[in-house]
Image: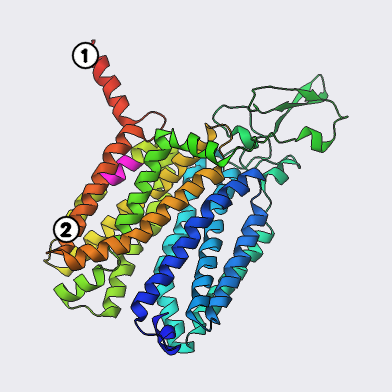
Amino acid sequence: MPFQLEKLGYTKVSSLAGWLLFAYSAGLAISTIPIAMLSERYNARKWPLIFGLLVLTGSQILLMEAPSYAVMCIARILQGFGSSVVWVVGLALLCDSAPPATVGLQLGFAMIGLSVGLVIGPAVGGALYTRFGYRGPFIFSIGTTVIDLLGRLIIIERKEALLWGVDPAGSVTGSAVLPSASPEIDTGCQSEKMETKAEEGVQISEFRDIVAPANNVQPESGPSHSRSSQTSIPRKNPISLLTVLAKLGTSSRTLVACFILFVYGLVYSSQEPSIPVHLQRVWGLNSATVGIVFIAAVVPTLFSSPLTGFLSDRYGPEWVTFCFLLFALPWWVVIIVEWRLALFISSFALEAFFTSGIMSPLSAELAAVSRTMEGVGFGHVYGALNLVYGIGSTLGPIVGGQIFDHVKRGWMVLCLVSTAMLSVSLVLASCFIGSDPLLYRLLRRCNASSHI
């Protein structure tokens, strides 16, 4: 982007490129709340995703052919809007379709895409720019977006699958039998349960509604009912933005999860502008070797997300979030040591592995909170996730760059500030994450022991 700005005759391209990054973040932040509200109000996933990908494709074409800086800024704002749709609605679609018992694992697999993009994006973009010029990376990204768009066209939403007696979220094995009523299942998008029993050689089908928000159960039976009436889907009544904010704002689990995600976005992105300069000053690395160091750090995150998702489903998000934050803290301190490059790379990789591992359990935690709130859907909570993470990752490079450039021993101070923020997150996670937080379990156990 800086080279294209120079080609168009602009000066101070570094500052202008920074504002282009801000334009993307502004588009993402401004659009997140409307996207989340509309997606839940109209109970739609497929068509918002298609619309978002069309906007994303158009924004890339506009940015590729932009004749001026103003058009570039507009394209970046639209790009942020399209990306926001993909994140918010995409995660909501996944939680709609995944069984609650495995939602953490499925979210972990989804997070792999972010890590893969971080690994191959700079390398592929640089190679295409060198070989084909400015348009090369854009043509590649437009092609991948179109492939994604084709995949979205064949999506079958859960509400449509239920009309045919198939519930993708009904069981871990993907059984076509609809699930039984359970207060832990999201009451806003459940269908009727079908049980088939053989009594004296006669096959009897019983259809029962899953627990509705008012907890009214209306049994239906008999062949006279049409398929549509048998598989009607109770929906959460749409609520206003202020009501959604009030519900989320009074939930300590939601607030703490969002705070930790904000901290994660802040500390993780704060190192990005500083590490290349630090590596060059201490070990004399050039741009090529710095890129290899970044790849070595990002590759472990390909495994941390599905691993923590699986562990979250099995043991609960409270354990996984606490343990991975605890194991991450030492490496944020070790990375300060200016001894061997191998030690730095190892510490950087372990830091990235454990820190990025909190994304899956916290995403699963937000999904679990949504199921307990009447009128609050997956789109709402993942809109909050997208917003706080976007703000954190936007402020991170600014804060990190300012500390590194203007504070004596800036690298050490930056790492210690990040360690302090993660330590606060660790304490909050022990107090508020999960339906039964770890601190309260410990206090109950201590009280029980004192009475023996």
Measured along the vertical axis of the image, is residue 314 above or below residue 48? above
Q: Are marks 1 and 2 in contact (CB under 8 Å)?
A: no
Q: Is residue 27 magenta?
A: no
Disc number lying in front (1 or 2) = 2
Mark 1 surroundings: few (<14), some (14-19) or many (≥20) residues within 10 A: few
- Say which quarter of the image contains residue 443: top left
Q: Residue 303 at what x, y percent from top left? A: 39, 55
Q: Residue 310 at what x, y percent from top left? A: 43, 44
Residue 40 can be seen, yes or no: yes
Task: State the extent of the magenta-drawn residues as a range.
Answer: 321-326
Residue wearing tag 2 = 413
- Say which quarter of the image contains residue 332: bottom left
Measured along the vertical axis of the image, is residue 452 above or below residue 86? above
Q: Residue 176 at what x, y percent from top left? A: 68, 40
Measured along the vertical axis of the image, is residue 94 above or below residue 136? above
Q: Nearer the viewer, residue 411 or 434?
A: 411
- Cα separation, mark 1 vs mark 2, equals 43 Å
Mark 1 residue element:
helix
Residue 331 can be seen, yes or no: no
Residue wearing tag 1 = 450
Mark 2 surroundings: few (<14), some (14-19) or many (≥20) residues within 10 A: some
Q: Quadrant of the C terminus?
A: top left
Mark 2 residue element:
helix
Q: Residue 189 at what x, y percent from top left? A: 64, 37
Report the magenta stretch's main SS: helix
